[in-house]
Image (spheres, helix red, strand yellow):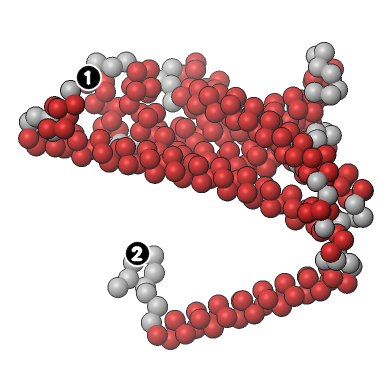
C-alpha cells in the first residue's frame, strides 16, 4: 500500500533503512563517547563540579530560583500583553476597511522583520533617555517591550492564518443570520480558529520563555541563564554542570507549558465533537435529546 508522498518500502529497502539506523546510532555513540571523554579530561565530569547542586541549597536559593522567578515574570508579562495585542492586530489585518488593514499590516511586518534582541536594546535606550524608569527595572521593561513587539506581530499572523483557514461558509452563515462583522469574528470565527491556532500559539509561547535569556546576555537582566556567571565564579568553574542544570530547568518549564496546552487542545476538540454530535442529533430527530430536555 502506498501513499501520495511515497511507496511503502519493500524487504530490501527495509534492510537498508535498518542498516542506516544502526550506522547512525553507532556514529552518535562514538560522538557522545568522544565528547564525554573530552569533558572528563578537562575535569568537568568530576563530582565536585556537580555536587553543589545537590549538597548546597544556596545554589538554588541565591541563584537558580531567583533567576527562574525573573524568567517567569518577564515571560508572563510578555504573554499577557502579547496575546491580546496580537489578536487585535490579527483581526485588524482581516478588516474590510483599507484604512485599518494597511497601517496594521505595516506595523506587523515592521516588527516581524526586526530581531527581538535589537528591539530589546532599542527599548532599553529609549527607557534610559526619555523615561524616569530606574536602572534596576530598566532591563525587565526592555525585555518585556522587545518580546511584546515581536511576538505580538507573529501572533497576529497566526490569528490571521487561523481565521482564514476556516471554511468560508462559517462567516456567510453568520452574516445570513444578521450578525455584524465584529459579532461574526468574536462569536463564530475566533472560537473555532482557537483549536487550529493553538499549536502555533504554544510554540510562540515557548519562544517567549526562551528569548528572555537574550536580556540576560546583553542587558544585565538577572534571568535564569545569566545565573551561570555567578555560579561558575563561586563554585569552581563548573560551567558544563551549570549549563546542564539550567537547560534541564528550561526543558521542564517548556514541557509543562506544552503539556498544559495539549490538554487544553484535547478538551477543546472533545467539546467541538460533542457539540457536533448534539447538533446532528437535533437535526435528524427534529427535537432535542432526552438528556437535554430533562436537564432543561
Quadrant in which the C terminus is drawn: top left
Residue 1 x, y percent position in the rendering: 30, 73
What SS does tag 2 mark?
loop
Residue 44 x, y percent position in the rendering: 85, 64
Towards the viewer: 86 or 50:
50
Identify the image quadrant of residue 240.
Answer: bottom right
Q: Residue at x 39, y 65 (%)?
A: 5
Q: Which of marks 1 and 2 is nearer the N terminus?
A: 2
Question: Closer to the observer: label 1 or label 2?
Answer: 1
Identify the image quadrant of residue 123.
Answer: top right
Q: Residue at x 74, y 49 (%)?
A: 246
Q: Which mark is residue 232?
A: none
**273 with respect to 99 (left or right):** left
Q: Please give the residue where the numbered disc 1 appears in the rendered image.
A: 177
Residue 240 appears in the figure: no
Towards the viewer: 225 or 196:
225
Residue 178 appears in the figure: yes
What SS does tag 1 mark?
loop
**150 with respect to 244 (left or right):** left
Q: Please give the residue where the numbered disc 2 appears in the rendered image.
A: 4
Please determine whether, in this image, residue 236 is positioned above or below residue 158: below
Q: Residue at x 70, y 26 (%)?
A: 145
Amino acid at each position: 500500500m502506498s501513499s501520495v508522498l511515497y511507496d511503502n518500502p519493500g524487504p530490501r529497502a527495509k534492510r537498508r533503512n535498518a542498516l542506516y539506523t544502526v550506522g547512525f546510532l553507532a556514529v552518535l555513540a562514538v560522538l557522545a563517547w568522544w565528547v564525554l571523554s573530552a569533558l572528563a579530561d578537562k575535569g568537568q565530569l568530576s563530582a565536585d563540579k556537580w555536587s553543589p547542586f545537590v549538597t548546597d541549597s544556596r545554589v538554588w536559593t541565591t541563584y537558580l530560583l531567583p533567576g527562574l522567578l525573573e524568567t517567569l515574570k518577564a515571560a508572563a508579562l510578555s504573554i499577557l500583553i502579547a496575546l491580546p495585542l496580537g489578536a487585535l492586530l490579527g483581526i485588524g489585518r482581516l478588516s474590510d476597511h483599507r484604512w485599518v488593514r494597511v497601517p496594521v499590516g505595516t506595523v506587523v511586518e515592521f516588527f516581524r522583520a526586526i530581531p527581538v534582541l535589537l528591539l530589546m536594546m532599542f527599548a532599553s535606550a529609549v527607557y534610559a533617555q526619555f523615561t524616569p524608569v530606574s536602572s534596576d527595572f530598566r532591563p525587565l521593561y526592555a525585555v518585556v517591550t522587545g518580546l511584546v513587539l515581536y511576538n505580538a506581530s507573529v501572533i497576529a499572523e497566526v490569528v490571521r492564518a487561523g481565521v482564514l483557514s476556516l471554511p468560508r461558509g462559517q462567516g456567510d452563515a453568520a452574516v445570513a443570520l444578521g450578525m455584524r462583522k465584529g459579532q461574526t469574528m468574536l462569536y463564530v470565527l475566533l472560537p473555532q480558529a482557537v483549536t487550529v491556532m493553538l499549536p502555533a500559539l504554544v510554540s510562540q509561547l515557548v519562544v517567549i520563555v526562551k528569548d528572555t535569556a537574550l536580556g540576560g546576555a546583553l542587558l544585565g537582566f538577572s534571568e535564569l541563564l545569566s545565573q551561570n556567571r555567578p555560579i561558575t565564579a563561586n563554585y569552581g568553574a563548573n560551567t558544563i554542570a551549570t549549563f546542564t542544570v539550567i537547560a534541564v530547568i528550561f526543558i521542564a518549564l517548556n514541557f509543562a507549558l506544552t503539556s498544559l496546552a495539549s490538554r487544553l487542545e484535547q478538551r477543546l476538540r472533545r467539546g467541538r465533537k460533542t457539540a457536533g454530535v448534539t447538533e446532528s442529533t437535533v437535526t435528524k430527530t427534529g427535537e432535542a435529546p432526552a438528556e437535554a430536555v430533562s436537564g432543561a
